[in-house]
Each structure stands twice: as structure tokens, then as C-alpha cells.
Amino acid sequence: MKKNKKRFIVTGVIGAAILLLTCGLMIVNHKSSHQQMIDVLKDLAKRNNDVRSAFNPEVKYALLDSIIRMNGHGHSTDLLEAKAALALKVGKEEESVKFTRTYLTE
């Protein structure tokens, strides 16, 4: 009887140790929901801020700049207004003010 009781205790301790070890490894290898959200946002930022993206303000600004430089489009108020707005998004505030003054005077 004592042997069975001893074997039961040893088996229980070994089982509990294996369970705790398994749970500990799962917790260590599992990313928290906060880290998962950070990873998702980093991935989205990387995809959305790609220079080749048509929705990137820098790409739109370069395209609009080349269109304005073409013959006959340099005095279009709509294009200058759009370029002023994109210059703000890109971080070129002084150019934005310059373009705004240009299309307001025309």
C-alpha cells in the first residue's frame, strides 16, 4: 500500500513538473497582444510608406511636380493647389506657402 502511495506521489510530482515546464515554455515563446499589435503596425507602416506605393505622399508629390513642369501646366491653379497640399504632407512647409501664394495671385 505504501509503495503505491509513494509511486502515486512521484508520478504526480513528475506530471506537475512537466506541466509547469510546458506552460512556462509556451508563455516564454508566446508574444503578448501588445507586441503583436506593434508588429502589425510596423508591418503596415513599412508597406504604406514604401516609395513605390502610389498612395505615398512623396510619390504623389514627385508625379505632380513632373506634371506641373510639363509645357502648359505650370500655371494651373488646381495643380498648384494640389502641390501645396502635398508639400505640407511631405514636410515642405515653405514650398507649400510659396505654391499657395502663387495660385492665390493667379
Image: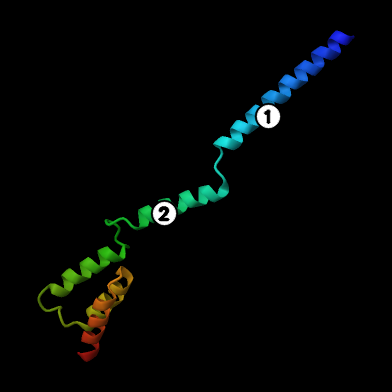
**Number of numbered discs present?**
2
Nearer to us: label 2 or label 1? 1
Residue 52 image offset from top left, x and y in percent: 27, 56
Residue located 46% across and 49% down the image: 39
Element type at mark 1? helix
Residue 19 image offset from top left, x and y in percent: 68, 27
For the N terminus, give its image quadrant.
top right
> In front here: 94 or 63?
94
Query: Is tag 2's residue or tag 1's residue first in the polypeptide sequence?
Result: 1
- Is 25 on the left or on the right of 38, as rendered? right
Considering every residue shown, the one lying at the far bottom of the view is 105
104 lies above or below 20: below
Element type at mark 2? helix
- Residue tagged 2: 44
Callout 1 amino acid: Leu
Residue 36 image offset from top left, x and y in percent: 52, 47
Residue 56 image offset from top left, x and y in percent: 31, 62
Q: Quadrant of residue 102?
A: bottom left
> In front here: 47 or 70?
47
99 lies above or below 59: below
Residue located 30% across and 68% down the image: 90
33 lies above or below 65: above
- Residue tagged 1: 20
Considering every residue shown, the one lying at the far right of the view is 1
Callout 2 amino acid: Leu
- Report the Cα–Cα distance between label 2 and label 1: 37 Å
> In front here: 42 or 74?
42
Residue located 31% across and 55% down the image: 50
Badge number at residue 89: none
